[in-house]
Amino acid sequence: MDEADEREHRAPPWRSRAQRLRWGMVAAASTAVVALGLSGIVGATASAPPDTDGAASPASTAGVAEPTATAPPAGGGFGRDQLTPAELRQAKTAAANGLTGTDVKGAPGPEYLSFELAAPKPGEDGPDAPRRAAVYFYDYTSEKLIKRVVNLRTGAVEGTFSRGRMQPPPSERETAEAVAIFLAHPLSADFKARFGRAAGRAFTSAAQVQATATTYTARPADTGADQCGASRCVQLFTRVPNGPFIDITDIVIDLSGRTVARLR
């Protein structure tokens, strides 16, 4: 086995402690935004929106219209239980209503990322307290994270908050789009050759790859990825299904600009 082949049959050769830490974050890549310490927008309540653009209230957020209240469906949860499927459907529908912007593919409407059960307001203790959902989107037009708080009892959106330079973990849909952008770029040629050697068969499509992703924020010395953080960028962690990892952590995919860069 030559040196190139041997490389594909062991875990990625992390070059720094930061890369090892990023790998440890991958398991949570599609879960709660709170875990990554997105203080401010995540911890905001409906009465105090932390908008870096200086918005005075949720209604003043540019490009966002408040939807009308809708009746909640049956199948609600209880207390601090996680959201039920019916509640999640209700929350996503209400939260998306009236939002403008574009998603990761450039289609109208921001990209849905995740949800969580929102904390109750002060004084709302007890079994009769209304349940609320916090729903997160990313708008690729304004390059902002959007949080909407939905009252699951009334169906009303009680708060809309947005902030730039907030980069929660990518969704599965964003990860799939990052893989597609990367594979269409000339920088993927080496990856395809290495994948073929590791898998024992020629690389032919994205369906052959297992991939997870983490968001990437530019470091001072970065070239070609210096906009990452203001725009939405990811690094991919790829492997042959049930096989070895293929290390491409030196590649950054800019989902906002749909470009690919190699870190140096």
Image: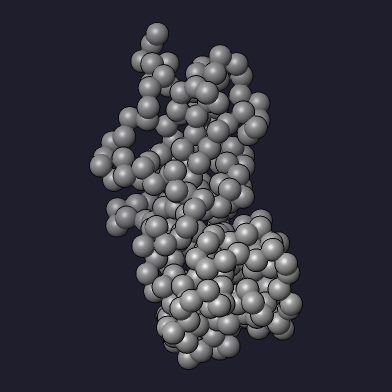
Provide residue 155's location: percent of width, then percent of height.
67, 77
Q: Is residue 111 visible?
A: no
Q: Quadrant of residue 131?
A: bottom right
- For the C terminus, the quadrant is top left
Q: What residue lies at 62% left-to-right and 59% top-to-bottom? A: 84
Q: Is residue 47 visible?
A: yes
Up-down: is 55 above or below 127? Answer: below
As rendered, which of 38 and 182 lies closer to the eye? 38
Indicate how the structure is coloured in the image.
Answer: one colour
Q: Residue furthest front?
A: 127
- Left or right, 70 with respect to 126, comes to right
As rendered, which of 14 and 33 lies closer to the eye? 33
As rendered, which of 101 and 47 lies closer to the eye? 47
Q: What residue lies at 41% left-to-right and 19% top-to-bottom? A: 9
Q: Quadrant of residue 112?
A: bottom right
Q: Quadrant of residue 7?
A: top left
- Left or right, 86 with respect to 40, comes to right
Q: What residue lies at 50% left-to-right and 22% top-to-bottom? A: 243
Provide residue 138's location: percent of width, then percent of height.
56, 65
- Left or right, 44 with respect to 88, comes to left
Q: What residue lies at 65% left-to-right and 26% top-to-bottom? A: 204
Q: Residue furthest top?
A: 1
